[in-house]
Amino acid sequence: MDVTPKATFNLSLQSAEEIIEKNRGDSGQRYDLIYIDPPFGLQREFQMIEADGTKKSFQDTWTSYDDYIDWLAKIIDGLFGLLKKDGWLYSHNNFEGNALVLGKVEKRVRKSFYTNISWVRSHPKNNIRIGWGNIVDSIMVLRKGNPFFDVEYSPLDSTYAANSFRNEDERGRYALAPATGEKSRPGHQFEYKGWSPTFGWRYSEEKTKELDEQGLIHFGKNKPYKKIYLEESKGSPVQNIWSDIYNLTRTEQNKRNYPTQKPLKMMERIVRSSSPPNGNVLDPFCGSGTTSIATFNVGENRSCDTFDVSEDALEIARRALIELGAGPLIYD
Ligand SMILES: C[S@@+](CC[C@H](N)C(=O)[O-])C[C@H]1O[C@@H](n2cnc3c(N)ncnc32)[C@H](O)[C@@H]1O
């Protein structure tokens, strides 16, 4: 009998501070993935006026930017404690915000810094006069323990395919991957067909022989390689520059319901890659619910808890989830 609980989507009118306070302690460590997209400390009110005149807004005003960074550092420290022993925390901000906050968080949190993703959120700007155009957001990635990760591949672009898959045999075009060790990662030492690579073979003697018998070893001029056929290639793994996801614009019909709403494709990428099936996701700055919707779309029984201090935001998220047929939906 399958005893896995059914995925739930929890939306609640509570602040990130309250959620951290209520869940302190070991029992609160229940999230595999936490994504935050808080206000960026920009000293303004974000608002959108709908065609029917209704206004949706949230405040991003602070005593000072330093005060904002202190607040955000405490939030990230607190949320880090809500991750399971293995989990990811993604902090979406601008570069300055993430850089300053990384210098302010507790040492154990700072040490969990894994990478920074640059999300190219807009097309190049033409009206640049006094400096470089800034078209990226920063998504700082913190890694606790040894969390789940599923590599995403993007389709090979034709220039890359032409440059990398240059060799050809009766099975088709192929690229060359290392079959030998490296200075920093020496491999297995043995001689095969007259080759004894300086830093050894990447595979055991038995495995190397097996690959060769399958025609999968390419003996180059200077060293042997493993063949990777274009036909079987999954594409190129997505790295930490995301330039294939466009931001939402106001002109797109029904695409944007809330100020600073993030693209669904971006959130689906984060949820799919960084939370396991049956896993739990948390977004304490729900906004229009993009993280919950992405979690529902990615599926495989992942659950998502979202919180916000704005009733408008939660109502938009709730409506979107109901429309999708997400359930059980817990709304309080
Ligand atoms: C940048 S928006 C999030 C947008 C969201 N990622 C989306 O795709 O729609 C930030 C949200 O944080 C909420 N917020 C601000 N301060 C908060 C706090 N202390 N706790 C929880 N939510 C807060 C705001 O009401 C706003 O909806």
Image: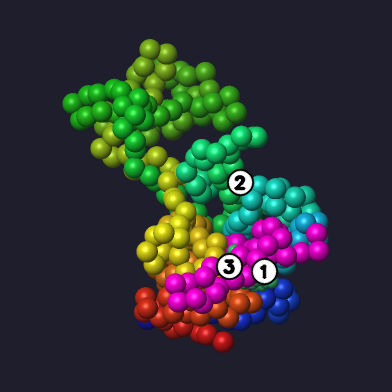
Residue 293, quarter of picture: bottom left
Judge whether 134 appears above or below 81 on screen. Answer: above
**Label 2 to label 3: alpha-carbon separation:** 28 Å
Q: CA distance from mark 3 to mark 1?
A: 9 Å
Q: Amino acid at mark 2?
A: Asn
Q: Is 137 placed left or right of 264 in the picture?
A: right
Magenta range: 35-64
Q: Earlier in the sequence, mark 2 or mark 3?
A: 3
Q: Earlier in the sequence, mark 3 or mark 1?
A: 3
Q: Give the percent coordinates (x, y) of residue 193.
A: 35, 18
Against 101, residue 155 (above or below) is above
Q: Earlier in the sequence, mark 1 or mark 2?
A: 1
Q: Quadrant of residue 168?
A: top left
Q: Is mark 1 within 8 Å of ligand 1?
A: yes
Numbered circle sitting on residue 59: 1
Foreground label between 3 and 1: 3
Label 3 is placed on what type of residue?
Gln
Q: Is mark 3 within 8 Å of ligand 1?
A: no
